[in-house]
Image: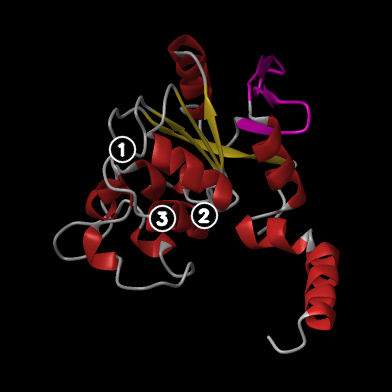
Amino acid sequence: MDKFTTLTGIAAPMPLINVDTDMIIPKQFLKTIKRSGLGVNLFDEMRYDADGAEIADFVLNKPAYRDAEILIAGDNFGCGSSREHAPWALLDFGIRCVIAPSFADIFFNNCFKNGILPIALPQELVDALMEDAEKGANARMTVDLENQVIIRPNGETVAFEVDPFRKHCLINGLDDIGLSLEKAAKIDAFEAQATQSRPWV
C-alpha cells in the first residue's frame, strides 16, 4: 500500500448526500478481485449515458477535475453495501482523500485499509472546502496527515482528527498484511522454536 503523508492536489466538489457504494461502483463491475482497472467505472451511471458516452456536466468529466485527487462530498458518503470495490475504484481513479460531514462505517474502515484518507468535518467546514473546490483546477489544497491539517487555497488551515493507529498505518503504507510483516522476526522465531520443540508437527 502506498504511503500517505502529504497530498497536494485538485479537489472535486460532489455536494450529494447519501452517495452509496452502488453509485461509487455499480454491481456489474464487482466480478473482479483485482484492485486495478476499476477507476474507469467509478460513478459509472453518473459519468456515462446509456451509449457509454461521457456526460459532460458530471464533475469528474469536466477538464478541471479529471485529475482530482481529493473529493469533497456530502453527508453519509459510502453508505449501502460493504463492497471493498468502492475504495478500490476511487483509488484506481486517483482519489486519495475524501472529505465529508460523515461516512458509512464499513466504507470508512475500508478506505484506511486501502490507502485512502477519509476525513469527517463539521458541515460548515465542508461547505467552505466545497466552495474552494468549485473554483476549479487553480484552487489546489493540501492534506497534511502528519500535522492533521488541510491547507486551503487561501492559506488558511483546517484541523482534522484521525485515529492514531490508522494514521500510523497510512503514513507507513501498512495494510493488514503489512502490519503482520512488521512482526516477521517474531513470527520466524516462534516457528523456529516450534519446529525445534515439536519436530513431528
The answer to whether residue 68 shows anywhere in this view is: no
> Is 167 situated left or right of 186 in this image?
left
Tell me the magenta residue range: 140-161
Residue 84: image tag: 3
- Amino acid type, mark 2: Leu
**For the residue carrying disc 3, how many other residues have a C-alpha within 10 Å: few (<14), some (14-19), or many (20+)?**
many
Q: Amino acid at mark 3?
A: Glu
Residue 200: give x, y in percent of width and height. 71, 89
Residue 81 picture location, percent across and down: 28, 47
User: Which label belongs to residue 79?
Assistant: 1
For the residue marked with disc 1, what is the amino acid?
Cys
Quadrant housing the N terminus? bottom right
Residue 150, relative to residue 40: is it above or below? Answer: above
Q: Nearer the viewer, mark 3 or mark 2?
A: 3
Vertical order, 151 against 95 (above or below): above
Q: Which residue is mark 2?
A: 91
